[in-house]
Image (cartoon, rainbow, N blue to C red):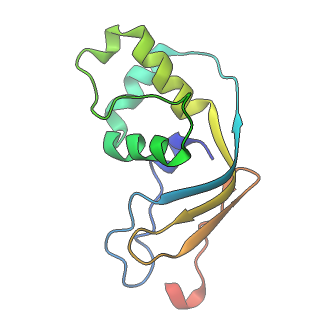
Amino acid sequence: MLLLTHNMLTSNCIKGVSNGYPLIIKATSIKKLESDFNPEFLIRMIPKLDWSAFYKATLMLGDAEISIPEKLIDSYEKDSEFLKKVHHALLEVEVVEGDLECPESGRKFPISSGIPNMLLKEDEI
C-alpha cells in the first residue's frame, strides 16, 4: 500500500464510527520501490492530499529517509527538491505487511502483500 492510497482510505463505513480518518499505520514490512519522477503529476496531486494526514503517515513509518515538512510549503511547484521528497514518500514507499487501525474504534484492517483488506464484517455495517 502506497501512502498515496492511505491518504484516501477511511473507516467511516463502520457502524457507529463518525471519524475513521486518518487510519493509523502499523507496518511490519516496508519495501522501497523505484518510480519515475513526474513533477507535473505531483503538482496536480498535492492540492488533493490531506497534507496533515500524509505527514502523520510518514511519521508512523519511522523511516528517516522519508522527510517532508509538517506544513505544505509555499510555491512548492517550483521546488524540485521538495517535489522529489514528496514523490519518494507518496510513490516509492510501500507498506507490504501490517495493519491499518481505525482511530475511533480500534478496528484493524490487515495489509498483506501490499493490499489493505478494508472489507467489513456483516455486523459492522
Where residue 112 sits in the image (x, y, percent)? 74, 58
Q: Looking at this view, is 122 or 87 the one in front?
A: 87
Q: Is residue 13 left or right of residue 1?
A: left
Residue most extreme to the right: 113
Q: Looking at this view, is 61 or 124 the one in front?
A: 61
Task: Please tell me which residue is depicted at 36% across the width and 84% down the height of the picture.
Answer: 16
Q: Is residue 47 above or below residue 61?
A: above
Q: How many marks?
A: 0
Q: Is residue 68 above or below residue 26?
A: above
Task: Please tell me which residue is depicted at 39% across the width and 25% down the height of the picture.
Answer: 44
Where residue 43 sits in the image (x, y, percent)? 39, 21
Task: Please tell me which residue is depicted at 41% across the width and 68% down the height of the picture.
Answer: 103
Q: Is residue 94 left or right of residue 8?
A: right
Residue most extreme to the left: 74
Where on the picture, by quarter, is residue 121?
bottom right
Where on the picture, by quarter, is residue 20?
bottom left
Where residue 78 sits in the image (x, y, percent)? 33, 8
Task: Please tell me which residue is depicted at 54% across the width and 31% down the height of the picture.
Answer: 64
Q: Is residue 30 left or right of residue 88?
A: right
Q: Looking at this view, is 69 or 80 the one in front?
A: 69
Q: Is residue 71 above or below residue 62?
A: above
Where residue 39 sits in the image (x, y, percent)? 47, 14
